[in-house]
Amino acid sequence: MKRYDPQMHTAEHILNQTMIRMFGCDRCFSMHLERKKSKCDYYFTRPLTEDEEEQIQEKVNRVIHLGLPVTEKHVDMSEAGHLYDISKLPEQELHSVRIVNVGDYDSCPCIGEHVSNTAEIGEFRLTTTSFENGVLRIRFKLDRSR
């Protein structure tokens, strides 16, 4: 499994699904996850407004505070290919794919580590955003003192 910080990585799943639901965009195409700060890059058409930034932060925190279980299941590769984007999976012969579910909020193929419940994440804080050449970058941190 990929060695990401489990709290940050699970927050990234929630951020991705929030972006999909709010803007109809795809999951981030690039990310850099660290314990102290992280970023996700999305193909997008414009910068976010301050109001949209606040809404994203509020929606991500609302999901975190629900205390959703984070579970995994393995599905046959052919089934996964019909249900999910599997293009980011390692290029190797796989017979099944690990699907990570964040309650009923998000579900996607993933090889990383996660918390077992969203209540373990802490408070999500969107720090800054930038937009350049069709790429929206969202930077965020977690307040883990909760």
Image: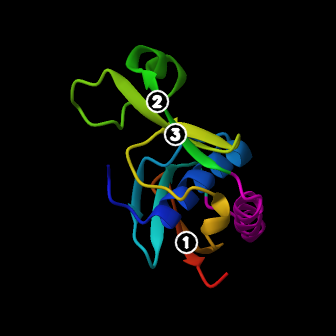
The residue drawn where x is 61% and y is 61% is 47
Q: Amino acid at mark 1?
A: Phe
Let me know if residue 142 is in the magenta part: no
Dot 2 or dot 1: first in sequence order is: 2
Q: Are marks 3 and 2 in contact (CB under 8 Å)?
A: no
Q: Is residue 138 left or right of residue 55?
A: left
Q: Which mark is residue 85?
A: 2
Q: Amino acid at mark 2?
A: Asp
Colour scheme employed for the rendering of this structure: rainbow
Let me know if residue 49 is in the magenta part: yes
Q: Which mark is residue 140?
A: 1
Please name the predominant secondary structure of the magenta segment in the image: helix
Distance from the alpha carbon under mark 1 to that under mark 3: 25 Å
Quarter holding residue 20: top right
Q: Residue 70, relative to residue 86: is it above or below?
A: below
Residue identifier under label 3:
72
